[in-house]
Image (tube, rainbow, N blue to C red):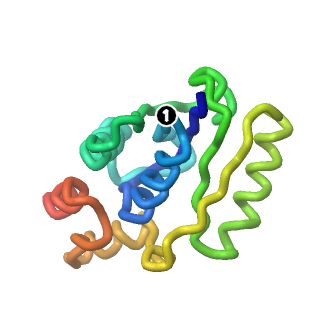
Amino acid sequence: MKIAIYPGSFDPVTNGHVDIIERAAKLADKLVVAVIRNPEKKPRFPLEQRVGMLADSLKKHKNVVVESFDGLLVDFARKNKANIIVRGLRAVSDFDYEFQMALTNRKMAPEIETLFFMTDYKYSYLSSSFVKQIAHLGGDVGELVPKAVAERLKRR
């Protein structure tokens, strides 16, 4: 069974994230979207809300589950019997960081492969940080994020 993990802070989830999730879900029997509790970041949305927004946005995908975790990704992957880590790349600037992370994960867990997905060109500019800034300034984010997320950002 191919079990993949797609980790991230998803603060908030964007249509770019959803695109990667939908494509990765086609290659795995089960895809765990793993929302990390990162103590180094100060998220706009609490962990439970990020998990909820993802679950709302992904409920049509039967082989996708959303969970939260803290600690090492490879430990979470092993706990879920995952053999693939999915990572998205928007630009060349993402590659250096992601490459180092993939090599580090391989050193700690050689049985787990990292699979990189290039973002669809229509999402190459998109980031959660930009979405938060646009929403904060009263802009329309309806085409950038799933409907459930746009509604929550509007309420904030």
Name the amino acid type tagged 1.
Lys
Name the residue located 55 percent from the left edge and 46 percent from the top edge. Answer: 27
Is residue 23 toward the left or the right of residue 151 in the image? right
Name the residue located 53 percent from the left edge and 42 percent from the top edge. Answer: 38
Name the residue located 22 percent from the left edge and 70 percent from the top edge. Answer: 142
- Which quadrant of the figure has residue 117? bottom right
Q: Residue furthest right?
A: 107
Q: With respect to residue 137, does 156 lie above or below?
A: above
| SS type, badge 1 | strand
* Residue situated in front as seen by the camera: 11 or 76: 76
Q: Quadrant of the C terminus?
A: bottom left
Q: Residues within 10 Å of mark 1 (few under 14, many from 20)?
A: some
From the top left corner, tell me how far across and down residue 126 is, in percent. 44, 73
From the top left corner, tell me how far across and down residue 131 is, in percent. 35, 69
Name the residue located 31 percent from the left edge and 45 percent from the top edge. Answer: 58
Q: Quadrant of the N terminus?
A: top right
Is residue 111 toward the left or the right of residue 27 in the image? right
Tag 1 residue: 30
From the top left corner, tell me how far across and down residue 61 is, in percent. 34, 42
Q: With respect to residue 36, does 123 lie above or below?
A: below
- Which quadrant of the figure has residue 137? bottom left
Is residue 156 toward the left or the right of residue 69 in the image? left
- Which quadrant of the figure has residue 66? top left
Task: Report how many numbered discs are placed on residues in the image.
Answer: 1
* Residue situated in front as seen by the camera: 155 or 144: 144
Q: Residue furthest top?
A: 79
